[in-house]
Structure formats: C-alpha cells, structure tokens
Image (cartoon, rainbow, N blue to C red):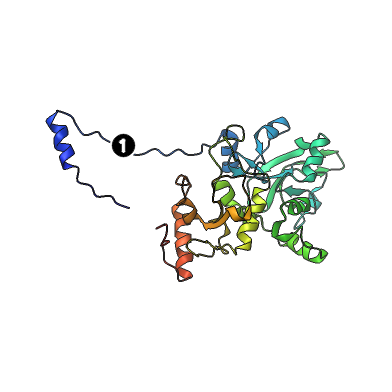
Amino acid sequence: MAINVDLSGLEKALKSIGCKKAEIGSIRRRTKIAGPIESKIIEDGSVVLIGDELIKHLDASTGLLAIGNTQITLHIYDPFADKEELSKQPATQPKFHLTECKTIENMRDKGRFDRYVSSNRRDGLFQVRPYEFDTNDHGDEMEANLTPCKNCLMSLDYDGYAQQNIYSMKERIFLDFSLERFFEDFESVFRCMPLYTAETFPEGNYTKDWARISRETRRKANWTCSCCGVCCAEQTGLSHAHHKDGIRGNNRPSNLEVLCLACHKSRPFHGRMAYPPQEKLKLEQLRISQKLPRLCDSCNL
C-alpha cells in the first residue's frame, strides 16, 4: 500500500542546517544460501555421498529427507540387480526412499548406509550401476525406473496408505505413486523452513512428523484456503499449513490453519517467504477460474 506523506518541511529544515537527504539503496533481503553439496544436487539432479559424508549433510527434521533446504530421495547406487532387471518398467528393485523409514534405520544398524545416494530428480529415473554376476562387479551407470519404498509410504501414511486395510487398495496407491506429485505436495514444507539449522533454531522447531501432519491437514481441508477460499487441489504445492501461534512444534488441530501461499505470506513474520512470479500467476489463475477475486480481500495478495 502506498503511503503519501508531505516531507517538504523536513527537507527545508535539512537544507537550512546544511544537511543532505540520505540516498537509500535497494533493500537486501536475507535469503537461504545453498551450500556446495545442495547446489550440486540442484544442478545435476543427484550426487553421490558416501557414509559419514551423507549422514553429515542429510536432514530429516520434518519427516522428509533433505539436504539443506532441498528435498531429496535416497536409493542404492550399486544394487544386486542385473541390467535386465533394472531395465524393467518399472524395476522391482531397488526401491527409492522418501523418509527415514525402518528400512533405512535397519541399513544404518547393519553398517550398510553407505550404499545410498541422494537424488532430487522428479521423473522417477535414478542413476544406478547394474550388477554383473559373471564378474561379480558392477557395470556402467544407467538410468532405472524405480518404485517407492512401501515402508516409507506407511511411515508417511501417504494417500492414506497406512490406514488402508484392503491389500488391493494399498497396491493401487503404490502403483499410482507419482514422484512429481509427491515433491509438489511437500513444496510448502520446504518453502516455510526457517533460516536456522536444527542446532541454531531458538525454540519451537518442526516435529519429525510435520510433513505427514501438514499434508493430512491440507488434504482434510480439500487444499482450500481458509482466508481467500481458493481450492489448490490442482496445485497442491500452493496450499500450506500454518501454525497460528507461530510455534512450529504445536501441531494441535486447533492451532493449524490451511492457507494458500499468498495468504500465508501475509501472516506476521512470514514476509520473507518466497512468492515467485510464476506461482503468483498460477494462484491468481486458480482464483479467477473459481470465480474468486484475483487478490484476497483480506490480505490484498
């Protein structure tokens, strides 16, 4: 909102005592800076981190796997599967992981965690090296179409997987899984991450089940903003779960509010939240298509 104030009197007073008006440059916004590992994942789509190096950079504080502020998946780079197996559409092994499920915990306990590599690709293709049983060695790198780990789907209760008692329905959720949609569903979780690390954040950090709670809260509200009324079911990444009291660890339903990206950005202390032009356009188009005002009447965003 433009503010019109007549400062001519103040400027005359400055001149009378020989002072000049200060030149105000552009405001520098504090932004998240990706480290070299995160930058490489963003640029190349995947990066091989082994053992302690992967553990050092890996973060699962919200219930999802991440390096820095970039969501990732984990998969075994050198699986015990030959080229024929890995060429299947999809391959039955290895699986890729979405969270620190019991499979990942088991591999840690067995000292086999260094077999995993991280990836940020959304197309369902993963870099692997097939096992050649004749030579007992791994061959040249190839792309494989992998499927998600069912323990991860269970842990996240993705699309109600954990609550489903009918095997055929569980299998349908598994077979219909889209990595592109999965990343989109949780974009809001990473957009809202604070500019602190788990060690330096003062208090009230996100709980480890926040990703699951966030998605479930938004799903129950049909991805509809409680402020402007726009339904983001077609663009779930534009739908956010907001902590009303500002305490990220308070996940009581009464403290959670479903908002679109724009209305969330308008809340106190959320002004730094990224609102790229392309997402602004998507949101405004959604509102118009649903016969809503282009800008929220309450937030003016």
Which residue of the protein is positioned furthest toward the right in this rendering? Answer: 134
The tally of labels here is: 1
Q: Quadrant of residue 18?
A: top left
Along the line of sight, the residue nearer the viewer: 76 or 52: 52
Which residue of the protein is positioned furthest toward the left in this rendering? Answer: 16
Label 1, on which residue?
A: 25
Q: Say above or below: 273 vs 289.
A: above
| Residue 4 locus on image (x, y percent) | 24, 50
In the rendered structure, which amino acid carries the disc numbered 1?
Gly
Q: Is residue 179 visible?
A: yes
- Tell me what residue is drawn at x 71 percent, y 52 percent: 156
- Tell me what residue is drawn at x 58 percent, y 59 percent: 236
Badge 1 marks a residue whose secondary structure is loop
Q: Quadrant of residue 200?
A: top right
Q: Is residue 138 visible?
A: no
- Tell me what residue is drawn at x 47 percent, y 39 percent: 31
| Residue 118 locus on image (x, y percent) | 68, 41
Compared across the picture, whether 279 is left or right of 79 comes to left
Along the line of sight, the residue nearer the viewer: 134 or 19: 19
Which residue of the protein is positioned furthest toward the top in this rendering? Answer: 18
Along the line of sight, the residue nearer the viewer: 121 or 6: 6
**Crowd around label 1: few <14 · some 14–19 · many ≥20 (10 Å):** few
Compared across the picture, whether 203 is left or right of 173 comes to left
| Residue 291 locus on image (x, y percent) | 45, 71
| Residue 144 locus on image (x, y percent) | 72, 50
- Tell me what residue is drawn at x 80 percent, y 39 percent: 107
Q: Quadrant of residue 105?
A: top right
Q: Quadrant of the C terminus?
A: bottom left
Q: Say above or below: 100 vs 257.
A: above
Q: Say above or below: 250 vs 280.
A: above
